[in-house]
Amino acid sequence: MNFAVKELKNSLSVTGVVNLHFFEFPSDFYTKSDSHPFYELVYLSGGSLTIKSDGFNGELTKGKMVIHKPNEMHSLSCESESAPTVIIIGFTCKENSLEQICDLPLTLSPDDVKKLAEIIKEGRNVFAPPYNIPVYNMKKKKKITFGAEQMLKNLLEYFLIGILRDFSGAKSEEIETPDKLSVNQIISYLSDNFIEKITLDELAFIFKTNRSTLCSEFKNFTGKTINEFLNLKKLEIAKHKILSTDKTFTEIAEELNFDSIHYFTRFFKKHTGLSPKEFRKIEK
């Protein structure tokens, strides 16, 4: 029997990602009006922003998103009492189907926010830090998790196609019950990314909760704060590297993303009572 293969058409294809950031703007922050040859997605998970662009001028509030078109002049600012938590994703796309939703402040559904959280998580498997400050040339990691770049592309396409379907009224509104917070999933995420700088705001967004619930549930489950958990992970790896390799302490400090060898030494002595040099000499 001869089977006929049907070609699958791409309705929307993301061809590249320029940057992927999750950060809190300082009070009174503003950017100068600028343009660039790619789409820019701006989502507010907290606070508010004033946006000025060729296509939209107004306030963006918590839970809302706007997408700027390529080569569109735009700027943003926040009030002195506001410190908005923002996701910004710059990306390129072949088709112009996104044009119909550009410059419209869209309110994301719980399902949309869940998809956006997955994009942020996968982005950490592709890009090297910093994630929490704007950079013009975001570097890829030297060792990228298998399939991470394709997953990031697919997740972003999945998210955008869903937004377009909702906008065109192709699917009806659904009411979702919030997912139960899984501390095991948080532990797994922290274990994979403990070397990077992870903020409570980012974790709360990714796991669809708030800072207070996140911290209390984690402490109740593990007996440790998130910061204590991260410090123990770093200490565990630091001890292993000191004893099982001949790397210098400066190299180990850099690999564990400490700001300096001095900070690493203070951190290590605080938790062990020994300097890295003393620990290597005694334990080896």
Image (cartoon, rainbow, N blue to C red):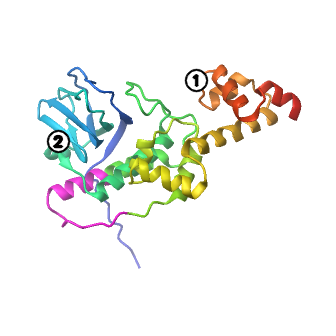
First reached walking from the N terminus: tag 1 or tag 2: 2
Dot 2 alpha-carbon crowd within 10 angstroms: few under 14, some 14 to 19, many 20 or more: many
In reply to whether residue 167 is colored magenta, the answer given is yes
> How many discs mark residues in the rendered view?
2
Q: Which quadrant: the N terminus? A: bottom left
Query: Of the residues tagged 1 and 2, which is closer to the observer?
Result: 1
Q: Which x, y percent locates residue 197?
A: 51, 35
Q: Quadrant of residue 267?
A: top right
Q: Which x, y percent locates residue 200?
A: 45, 42
The front one of 265 and 250 is 265
- Would residue 202 be visible to someone looking at this image? yes
Q: Is residue 230 above or below residue 74?
A: below
The front one of 181 and 127 is 181
Write the residue at 66% across / 42% down: 232
- Would residue 284 be visible to someone looking at this image? no
Q: Quadrant of residue 16?
A: top left
- The magenta segment is 158-178
Residue designated by label 1: 259
Dot 1 alpha-carbon crowd within 10 angstroms: few under 14, some 14 to 19, many 20 or more: few
Write the residue at 58% across / 38% down: 143
Q: Which x, y percent locates residue 180?
A: 43, 64
Disc 2 marks which amino acid?
Cys
Q: Secondary structure at mark 2?
A: loop
Q: Which x, y percent locates residue 118?
A: 41, 51
Q: Is residue 38 left or right of residue 53?
A: right
Residue designated by label 2: 102
The front one of 268 and 223 is 223
Q: CA distance from mark 1 to mark 2?
A: 40 Å
Disc 1 marks which amino acid?
Asp
In reply to whether residue 226 is colored magenta, the answer given is no
Q: Secondary structure at mark 1?
A: loop
